[in-house]
Image (spheres, rainbow, N blue to C red):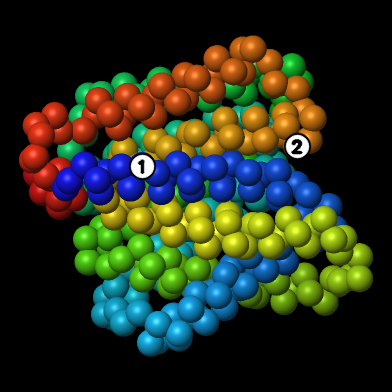
Amino acid sequence: MNERSNVAAYVALTAAVLFWGLSFVATKVALETMPTFTLIFFRFGLSGLLFTAVSMMRGGLPRLTRRAHLKLFLMAVFEPGLYFYFETVGLQHTTAPKAALIIATIPVAVLVFARVLIGERIRLFSLVGILVSLAGIGVLITGDPGFRWALGNHLVGDLLIIGAVVTAALYMVGARDLGRDYSAWDITCFQILYGALFYAPMFLVEMSAMDWGAVSGSSLLAAVYLTVFATVAAFLCYNFGLTRIQASRASVFINGIPVVTAVAAWVVLGERLTVLQAWGGAMVLLGVWMANALGRPRRVGVPEPEAGSH
């Protein structure tokens, strides 16, 4: 794989992290007047319509084999399907700091699944980078002046958040595997469409009690951002990155999301950002750099091993 492809992959992954990092602020605004699953279905339903419209203008929906459709359906069940459900419900039964720390272990889960399921090699610097990034997440969260470890029985919530970690990791490995045969557009198109189908029943339940007149303009604008940037653009960018570099290295970028969110909350919402949190963010970025710049093959001109090679 040439250097230009690697640069394009890193740019795409960085863009996805920026879009997803800002999405937490947008979600907070959107949920002020919109129910949870209505918002999620709005994101993926409208995104699915956009993908369908553009695909029709390009000559029709991508043509995939039945086996690929099955893989994409399962991938969409993992994320956005079960991931958003586990994360949303899990946060109702455990503390946000603990949930964030558990979510930060996604790169570790990807490392394991990528090795077991598609044979990706584990490089020492990739592992060290993941651990440094994980430590940075811990510093970023505990450096919050309002940080508290809430006591109580949060086992159900913790298990649901662990479920979110597993489903996110399986999605990333699945996208990497499919990326050997299909483009990021093909993968994202059906991932979004199948994700919308997954959330349709929950939306129909909420719709009966939905007061559309109560939806504010700011919530609607936030929902549009979540649709266009945090869903269409972000998944396209991230899936493109997964078709170019190993899942275990691409997954480390996910740990940059809390950094973007913390800075965005500081700028947009006026939330406090401490020096300790800034150091934590720097550790996260250092870990991402180590896992990618130092964790890739060193020989110039030698392509990165295929995901299925040993």
Q: Secondary structure at mark 1?
A: helix
Q: Residue at x 91, y 65 (%)?
A: 214
Residue 246 drawn at (x, y percent): 26, 44
Q: Is residue 173 visible?
A: no
Residue 218 is tagged as: none
Residue 84 seen anywhere in this rendered image of the structure: yes
Determine the residue positioned at 8% across, 40% down.
302
Q: Determine crowd level at label 2: few under 14, some 14-19, many 20+ residues with C-alpha closer than 10 A.
A: few
Q: x and y percent of residue 212 in the render?
A: 86, 71
Image quadrant of residue 125? top left
Residue 277 point in image, percent of width and height: 61, 18
Percent x, y of residue 115? 22, 42
Q: Residue furthest toward the front? A: 4
Residue type at mark 2 is Val
Q: Residue at x 58, y 56 (%)?
A: 229
Image quarter in which the C terminus is found: top left
Asked if 44 appears above or below 307 in the picture, the reply is below
Name the residue: 28% across, 63% down. Answer: 178
The residue beneath circle 2 is 268
Q: Earlier in the sequence, mark 1 or mark 2?
A: 1
Tell me if 85 is positioned left or right of 208 in this view.
Answer: left
Q: Which residue is mark 1?
A: 10
In whole angstroms, how far apart are the C-alphas of marks 1 and 2?
26 Å
Asked which secondary structure carries label 2, the reply is helix
Quarter of the rendering containing residue 200: bottom right
Observer-nearest of 198 and 126: 126
Q: Amino acid at mark 1?
A: Tyr
